[in-house]
Amino acid sequence: MEKVNEKHEALSAQEVTAQYYDEGTRWLPLDLAATLYAASRTKKWSRTFRTCVVLDEEIDPVVLQHALDDTIKRFPTFKMKLRDGLFWSYFERVKNNPKVQLETKYPYRPIIIEGTDEPCFRILYYKNRIAIEAFHSLTDGGGSSVFLDTLVGRYLQLRGETISFGETVRNACEKQTVDEAKDSHFDYYDSSVSASNPPTIKAYANENNTIPNYANVIHGMFRVDEIKALAKTKSLTITEYLTALLIYTFCQCADAPITEPIAISVPMDLRKRFESVSVRNFVYMTDITFCPEGRTDVTFDEICDTIRGELKKRATPENLLKSISSNASARVSPIIKPIPYFIKKAFLNNKYKKLQSAYTTFFTNLGEYHYPEEVAKHVLRVESVLADTPYMHFGCAAVSINGLFNFTFCSSNRNKDKQRFFFRYLAQQGIKVRVESNVDYE
Amino acid sequence: MRCLECNVDLGENYKKCPLCGAAAVDEAPLIEGITTAEYPKYDDSVLLSEKTVVKKNFYGKYLIPVVIAFELGFIVAAAMGHSAFWSVGVPVLLVAAYVVYLVCGLLQKKGTLLYGCEYMMKLSPVVVLSLLGALFARSGFWNMVICGSVCLFLFNVLALIRPERAKAQFYSFLYLG
C-alpha cells in the first residue's frame, strides 16, 4: 500500500523526531497504539505479552547477557521506561542495560513500568527457554519477536555459529534504522479518511476470578499440515478454524445459555500488509463475532458457516486505514492535544474498558516463523503467550515453526474447563495433540 | 506419557494431565520428536508478595512545584496588604524548602547531589537578600516582598526549565504541535 506521509507530516517537530534513531535518544513519544495501553495500566496490571524460544541446549546466562547487551544497542527503542508528561505519556531512556533473569516465578509477573530505572521489558531464561515479556506500549508481538529473534541469533553467534542475517534475525552489531524505530501508523495516516467507529456491543464475558501474580499456561502442540487439512474440510483458514473452535468452546462450556455475542478479537500484524519493518506497535484489531441468541444447540458447522471469510472481509485496505485514522485522530487533534494528560488518561482508560467489554477473548496468530538454517537447527519450538486481562477469562496465542503449531492458553485462574474442551475436541477430530503446562502436571 | 481421558500426549516426566488431572499413562506419544520444555517449580507464597507495578517517586520531585505554588500565594497575600508576616515567612519557607530538597536529592541517587547543590547555590543569594531585607525592613515593606517573591518565582521556573529544556521542548512543543 502506498505511503501517505513520506515525511511524517503529522509530527511537526522534525528535529525531535530525528533524534529517535540515535542511540543517544533520551525521549521517545509513544506510538499511536501504545497510548491506549499506557493509559489503561493500573497499579496491579498492565497489558503485557510474552514470546519464547526453546533451544536445543541449556542457556548460558553469561553469553545471553552479552547477547542482550548487543541487541539492546541494536534496538535502543526498547531501552525505555514510561513517564507521564504534561500532555501525553512518553518513553525515557534508561541508563543501564537490562539484566537477564533466571525465571523462578509465574509468567507475567508485573513489570514495573514507572518510577524505576528498568526498561519496560525483561528477558528470562530457564533451562532451554529464553523468554521476552514486554509491556505492550513498548512493542507488539511482531516487534518483540524481532527483538527476541535477533537476541537468539546473536546468542548463537557468540556460541560459535555463523548466522546469515535477514529480516527475521537481524544483525545485532548493526545500527537501528529509521524505518525500524518509527511509528509506521503515520506513514499511512490520512486525515481525509474518517475514523472507524469503536465497537458498541457488549460481548459475552466470563467472570474472571484472578489469582494475583498467577499464570496458568497450557501449550497445545500439533502438526501444521494436520490442522491445515482439518480447517480445509470446513473451507476455513487455520486462524478461522481455531477461532470457530474457541467460540464453540464458549458455547459448550457456559453455565447458562449465552444471549450476548461471543466476540473473539483477532489482532493482525500490519507489517506484512504495509511492508513495515518497525519494531514498535503496528497492529490492526479486528474481531469475529457469533451470537448464540440463548440457544444451547449451536453446532460447530453453524459457527463455521457464519464466520467463513469474515477476517478477509474485515481486513480490507479501507478498514485498515480507518483503524489508523481512529488511532491517530486523538493524537493530532488540536483540541485534544493541550488537554492535560491526567484528564486524557481518564478518558483513554474508559475507552479501553469499553473496548475490552466488546470482546470475549483475544486470539493472536503470529504465523509461521522462518529462521535461517543455522538458527532453525537449534530452535526446537517457539511459544507465544498472551495473558488474560481483568475483563477476560484467558488469552490465546499461536505460532508455528518447523511444521509444529503451538497454541497457548494463558489464564490467571485455575479453571481449565475450556482449555480441556478445546484440546479434547481437536483430538476427537483426529489431530495428534501434545499438551504441556507450567502447573498441575505432578 | 499420555492422557487417555483427553487423548493427548504429555511431557516425558508428567505424572498427571494438566487439563483434567487424570494420571498420566506411560505410553509412546503420537507425535514423535518433541521434548518437554520445562518450567521452574513455583513457590506459591510469591502470589501474595508482589502487589504493585508502580513504585512511588521520591518526594523532592514534587517539592518545587509546591514551593512555587506557595510563592504565588504569598505574592497574592502581599499584594492584598498582608505584608508583615509574609515578608519573613516567604524567605524562611523557601530556605527550608531548599534544604529539604537538597536532603531528598542526597537520598535519591548519585548525580542529584550536584544538581541539588547547584540549585541551592543559584538561588541562595536571592533568598539571603530577601531574608535580610525582610528582617531589617520596615513593616510596610511589602513592595520589596512582592518583587522578591516574583523574582524567586521566576528563578524557580527557570531553574526547572533550564536543565530540562530539551525535555520541555519535547513534551510540550511536540505535543502542542
Image (cartoon, grey):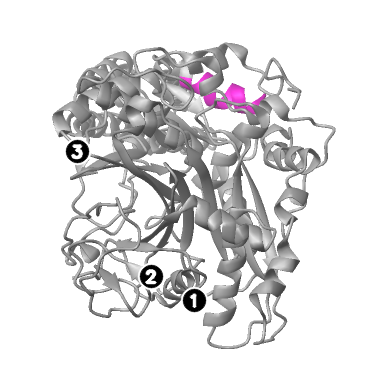
Query: Between residues A231 and A367, which one lies in front from this camera angle?
Result: A231
Residue A321: quarter of image: top right
Residue A207 is labelled as 1
The image quadrant that residue A358 belongs to is bottom right
Q: Position of residue A99 (x, y in %)?
A: 22, 33
User: Where in the figure is residue A281, as x and y percent of width and height?
Assistant: 54, 36
Tell me whether circle 3 and circle 1 mark residues in contact (CB < 8 Å).
no
Q: Magenta segment, which residues?
A: B167-177
Q: Which residue is mark 2?
A: A210
Do marks 2 and 1 share a subunit? yes
Q: Chain of mark 2?
A: A
**Residue highlighted by disc 3:** A57
Which type of secondary structure does the marked residue at label 1 adopt?
Answer: loop
How crowded is the residue under tag 1: few (<14 C-alpha within 10 Å), some, or many (20+)? few
**What amino acid does circle 3 point to?**
Glu
Which of discs 2 and 3 lies nearer the camera? The answer is: 3
Task: Residue at 72%, 59% (x, y): give it.
Answer: A199
Quick check: A262 above or below A41?
below
